[in-house]
Amino acid sequence: MDKIVRYIAQDGSAFVIACDSTETVGEMEKIHKTSATVTAALGRLTTAASMMGDMLKGKDDSVTVRLNGGGPAGDLIAVSDSDGNARAYVQNPVVEIPLKPNGKLDVSGAVGTDGQLYVIKDMGMKEPYIGQTPIVSGEIAEDITNYFATSEQTPSVCALGVLVNPDLSVKHAGGYIIQLLPGCEDEVITKIEENIASIPSVTKMLEDGFTADDIAKRAMQGIELDKLDESAFCYKCNCSKERVESALIGTGLQNMQEMADSGEDTEVECHFCNKKYVFTPEDIKRLINNASN
């Protein structure tokens, strides 16, 4: 299991959340069989979603983060519950593009920069909260930072990292988000700016043996902190046969009648975990009867 930690400055001026998401992103790569660049892109988005989910207050709350920047990877979606358990999907899992001149994976080239970042928070209200901001870099972290500043009016810093092995497995993944709280003094802002200017990359810290706690403390170095909580999380899909049945009923009775009349089994695959659900013509007829009564 991976770990998320949350700290707050003792004077209540700033907040930091950090995580090691290596196992979660590793499971994502195994399920979707992503190329290295897509693993880095979707892994960053999934890591961000886990932290944003953990920041929600209600136990049944969830957050969906979606990017479509017009790049070859297409739509990228990550969903998290309030414990940070995440699942993800990408439209085109294999994108082969050249490395950047500095030798790093070209995440923005795969994601694209002509599009929007959407954040949908389901917090048990009549309607979900939907935030939407333009993609500013396609590197994910900068886009999350811009979302918080623009849509939630919360000055924030987000850093995300995914290190991919030569065999395409995930070696390290993680991230942190710092947020300034109302009344934050200039002295604290200056200290955080100094820390961000000198802090190593997330993957470098993980490579050096940093834990999620170590990353949070390094990001807030020189500021007295109180630990709020920590929690374990993983890649977790909430699909079930009942949910798929509801989705089939949602396609309409006429559509289901055509499925039943075909005489062939209907197979439905979950986008998030690739689990397959098979419905015989008799199963479809039963659903039609249930929906009609």
Image (cartoon, rainbow, N blue to C red):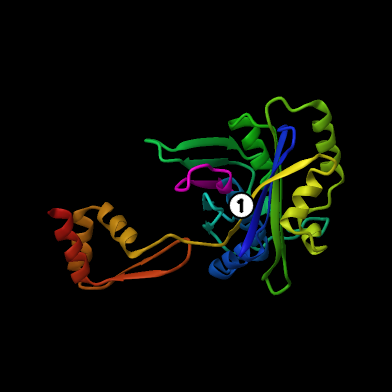
Q: Could you tell whether 210 is left or right of 287 in the image? A: right
Query: Residue 265 is drawn in which quadrant?
Result: bottom left
Residue 57 part of the magenta segment: yes
Residue 113 shown left or right of residue 184 in the figure: left
- The picture quadrant where one finds residue 197 is top right
Judging by the rendered image, the residue that carries numbered circle 1 is 45
Residue depicted at 42% across the width and 63% down the height: 270
In which quadrant will I find the N terminus?
bottom right
The magenta span reads 53-70
Query: Is 13 contained in the magenta span?
Result: no
Residue 236's spot in the image, x, y percent? 50, 62
Q: Measuring 12% from the left and 54% from the top, which residue is drawn there?
A: 293
Is the residue 271 above or below the residue 281 in the image? above
Mark 1, Cα crowd under 10 Å, few <14 / some 14-19 / many 20+, is many
Q: x, y (%) of residue 201?
A: 80, 53
Query: Horizontal and vertical percent for residue 194?
Result: 86, 38
**Which one is nearer the viewer's eye here, 194 or 271?**
194
